[in-house]
Amino acid sequence: MPVTREIIAPQNEKLNVSRNLNLPHSPGIRAGEFIFLSGMLSVDPTTGERSPGTVAHETRQTLSNMRHMLESAGSSLERVVKINVLLHDMLEFDNMNGVYRQFFAKDPPTRTTCGVQLSAGMKVEIECIALAG
Amino acid sequence: MIYDRIEYDDLNRVYRQYVPNGPPARTVWSVRIIDAFKVQLDAIAIV
């Protein structure tokens, strides 16, 4: 049986950044039993504007938005299997982890963290692969 | 993957011609690429 390909989007349209900024990617794709999310930045869910701040703040806001995105598609943070964290400076690794572990207190997903150059002075970007449903 | 964030719009201009409808999920990583190449792509597709 062929695997289905379905675009997924957040229920809160303010968080549909790719559509609001006319970028050529989808917020996420469900492919069979897996969900692939595009990289997410810290965005204020009430305004749709970027919400820059400390690494702790951006990590918290991004994972909160990721939770919303996954739940919009019938999944959840508990069903995430792989995360990539892109960090503006690896010296902030501990600052990211301090907040990160609050979201994944038990049996956290596999993860890779890289130090990269991010857009517009943002400090954290996070993408994930999760199990659907 | 792109060698410098400053070329993000240049990447998108060409990229969107290849995925005009229902584009895949994507994250652009600004990283150093081997042999001074400026763009590297990988993809996961359904069969």
Image: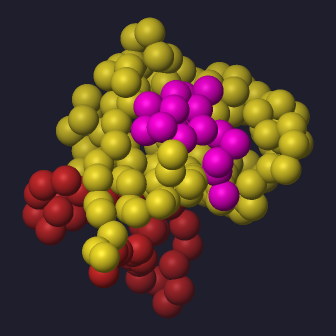
At x 48% / y 37%, what residue is drawn?
Answer: A74
Compared with A4, A21 (above or below) is above
One can see residue B4 in this view: no
| Chain B as rendered: colour | red
Compared with A47, A54 (above or below) is below
| Chain A as rendered: colour | yellow
At x 85% / y 50%, what residue is drawn?
Answer: A107
Q: Is residue A75 magenta?
A: yes
At x 41% / y 74%, what residue is drawn?
Answer: B44
Compared with A125, A64 (above or below) is above
Task: Using the image as rendered, state which of residue B2 and residue A133 is in the foreground.
Answer: A133
| Residue A89 in picture, x, y percent from top left | 73, 49
| Magenta residue span | A64-81
Name the quadrant containing residue A17: top left
| Residue A97 in picture, x, y percent from top left | 84, 41
Q: Residue furthest top?
A: A46
